Image: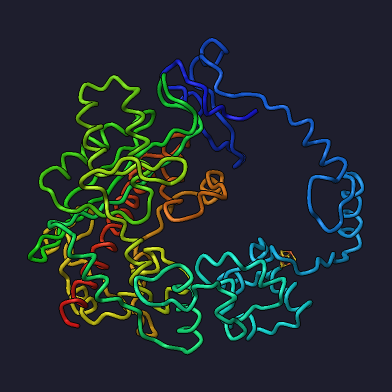
Amino acid sequence: MLADKNATANIDGLNQKFLFRENHDGRTSIEYVGDVSLEGLGNRILTDINVDGLCERIYQGTDSTDPLPMPFGDYCSYLADHYWDDDKIVMPIHKDCGNCEYRATQEDEQAGRTSGFKECWSSQLDWTDQDFEKPSIFDIWDFRRKPNMIEQGIFHYNELKPFHIGPDAEDISPPLIRQGRQWLQVTRTRDNDPLPFVDIDGLKEEMSHWVFPLHMIDFETSTLAIPFYKGMKPYETVAFQFSHHTIQEDGTITHFGEFINVERGFFPNFEFVRKLRNELTQDHGSVFRYASHENTVLNHILAQLQDSEERDKQELIDFIKIITHLKDDKGKIVRKGERDMIDLLDVVKKHYWHPSMGGSNSLKVVLPAILNSSTHIQKKYSKPIYGMNSNIRSHNYNDGWIWIQRDDNGEVTNPYKLLPPIFDDLDQETVEEFHTEDQIADGGAAMTAYGMIQFAEMSKGERDSIIKGLLNYCELDTLAMVLFIDYISHEIKTT
Ligand code: SF4
């Protein structure tokens, strides 16, 4: 049975009929609330899919490209026998090892856990600890030729030639293209060059189109399988939180506004966009997002509004159209608003790279890179200028908050690590029940937190503490964008 994305709920509050509860024995179960008869649940939102053919392929052993294809029963016996004899099954290194799921983080290894990946590669390729530490093809940003490299036995940066990256690898003139950025990462890392790549002219050109005051926004969203309201479908996007910072032309920075609504059973999207509209229509300044998420979410809400009966739906739709764009199936832009949001991630990819970022462009990696390399940012943010009544006004941080704090090695601590974890007070097993693989990414914690508040049993204290955590994290997300702009503005002025 799968959730049918085309089915429409015809009752309100379906998602609140199933609550997640922890029993006395520590196990979890679902509590039914109210009428859960077939009539009480309304339209079917689940659909049955016939998987006989797939099961048959699994039974026959023809479902995978496993080097040892065999019928399912035989395969179970094969695994059981090896397990019983404690006999390791040696798999040859193959092109998909880059996605090996048996890797261990540094913290895992320090905690005494072993890495299946390292075991395989050291036994089959004689790799030593040093080989694992050397920068390798696995670290290169968006490197799609990884499987080919593994097949050719090319793993480390010193074995790579430009043609391995692609025909345009040596084009590292700004703005950076994908292969140029990859080659820049390889060569600068190989040469131990500690300096960042900052394309001043390109950044100047980008900034010449920006209109003050600048608005940095970040959304937290979730997709819940069970619809909130009648008329909605499974897995519709729920936008429950945003944060909004502004920078004025004179450099004044403010945490201008925010929104959060995690109330159980309340569908927050229209309130969310109403509040965003109020905050962004007070001027005509440029609006910034980091990656495409905010554009995608607003286009989803636009479609939801079209099907809704909200009294101000036309104003909200018009507003969304002004700050977004829409692409067709072929990726061609078919609608572009006059204040279409500017993607700062795109600006980073084209004009900025720091060795400590390696192959990641996540804001959570860009932020510590800037904090550790810019004396301007260090000087400014090591003073207590951030807080509810401080120079830089905040909604969630106490007065005198200092962002520059150093560890024992003198490195600036990643600001995200200065915050308490969102789930500090909750039992880990309950948290893990909500974690599915695709949620473990940026924003995954917020999504999990939202799901927990909707469906899990928790005290008011736990709920309040999660909300506080969400507010702190989201404010930091937009502050990180502010710091990037503060950094590049200063670089442009002083270069
Ligand atoms: S490294 Fe990982 S993916 Fe590759 S063979 Fe070993 S266990 Fe399998």
405 on left or right of 148: left
55 on left or right of 457: right
As rendered, which of 338 and 237 lies closer to the eye? 338
As rendered, which of 439 and 321 lies closer to the eye? 321
As rendered, which of 21 and 276 lies closer to the eye? 276
Picture coordinates of residue 252, whole percent (x, y): 10, 63
Q: Is residue 312 above or below residue 470?
A: above
Q: Is residue 426 above or below residue 489?
A: above
340 on left or right of 416: left
144 on left or right of 481: right
Residue 311 lies in quadrant: top left
Residue 449 lies in quadrant: top left
Residue lying farthest top? 39
Q: Is residue 100 above or below residue 46?
A: below
Image quadrant occupied by the C terminus? bottom left
Picture coordinates of residue 411, whole percent (x, y): 36, 81
Q: What residue is at 14 percent from the left and 57 percent from the top?
A: 211
Residue lying farthest front? 167
Q: How many marks?
A: 0
Does the rendering let one see residue 74? yes
Picture coordinates of residue 277, whole percent (x, y): 19, 39
Q: What residue is at 34 percent from the left and 52 percent from the top?
A: 469
Residue 55 lies in quadrant: top right
Does the rendering let one see residue 461? no
Picture coordinates of residue 383, whole percent (x, y): 17, 74
Q: What residue is at 34 percent from the left and 50 percent from the top?
A: 470
Image quadrant occupied by the N terminus? top right
Q: Is residue 442 above or below residue 151?
A: above
- Tell which quarter ligand 1 is in: bottom right
What scheme was used to colour the molecule?
rainbow
As rendered, which of 346 and 105 lies closer to the eye? 346
